[in-house]
Image (cartoon, rainbow, N blue to C red):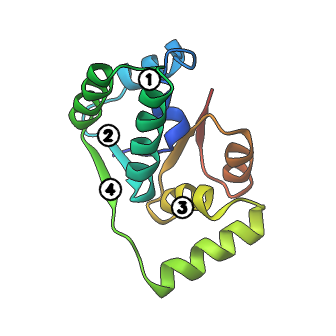
């Protein structure tokens, strides 16, 4: 079973009008049955913030945001539990080793721990994943 860790930049390209990507849509359309979609707990907060800011700036209507929330719920995304001191140390080490923010490190750490691949639009995160030996879908 292939596990894909999704970052917020990647999933946001599904619904933000000026960031929509047919290649991201194709990625989701090409997922095989049994494939696993994972996100660190941080993703839920980031995605909620992207939606709230998009509505505030009138990039999306409130109804559009509700539709996005429904769509994301149908994707079967599983979240990783928040960790403790061991997770903190791992995030710190990855951030330092690859020059990432602790937030971006959460996605790479999740992919490494789950022996998964990473779907991102973030160039720095994709480059760090490559250096760490993690397969990426970087559009």
Nearer the camera: disc 1 or disc 2 = 1
Which residue bears the numbered disc 3?
Answer: 106
Q: CA distance from mark 2 to mark 4?
A: 14 Å
Neighbour class for label 3 at 10 Å: few (<14), some, many (≥20)?
A: many
Neighbour class for label 4 at 10 Å: few (<14), some, many (≥20)?
A: some
Which residue bears the numbered disc 1?
Answer: 14
Is 105 displayed left or right of 45 in the figure? Answer: right
Residues tagged 2 and 4 counted as in contact (Cβ below 8 A): no
Residues tagged 1 and 3 counted as in contact (Cβ below 8 A): no
Q: Position of residue 77 (x, y in %)?
A: 30, 44
Q: Secondary structure at mark 2?
A: loop
Q: Secondary structure at mark 4?
A: strand
Residue drawn at point x = 68 percent, y = 43 percent: 126
Q: Position of residue 118 (x, y in %)?
A: 54, 45
Instruction: Point out the tag, 4 or 1, that comes first from the N-terminus.
Output: 1
Instruction: Point out the tag, 1 or 3, that comes first from the N-terminus.
Output: 1
Which residue bears the numbered disc 4?
Answer: 79
Residue drawn at point x = 44 percent, y = 17 percent: 26
Q: Position of residue 66 (x, y in %)?
A: 25, 28
Which residue bears the numbered disc 2?
Answer: 35
Q: Position of residue 130 (x, y in %)?
A: 70, 48
């Amino acid at each position: 079973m292939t596990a894909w860790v999704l970052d917020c930049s990647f999933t946001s390209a599904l619904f933000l009008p000026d960031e929509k990507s047919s290649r991201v849509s194709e990625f989701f359309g090409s997922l095989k049955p049994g494939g696993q979609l994972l996100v660190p707990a941080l993703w839920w907060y980031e995605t909620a913030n992207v939606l709230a800011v998009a509505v505030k700036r009138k990039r999306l209507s409130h109804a559009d945001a509700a539709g996005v929330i429904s769509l994301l719920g149908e994707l079967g995304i599983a979240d990783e539990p928040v960790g403790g001191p061991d997770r903190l140390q791992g995030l710190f080490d990855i951030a330092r080793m690859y020059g990432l923010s602790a937030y971006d490190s959460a996605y790479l750490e999740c992919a490494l721990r789950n022996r998964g691949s990473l779907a991102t639009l973030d160039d720095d995160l994709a480059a760090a994943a490559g250096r760490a030996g993690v397969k990426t879908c970087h559009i």
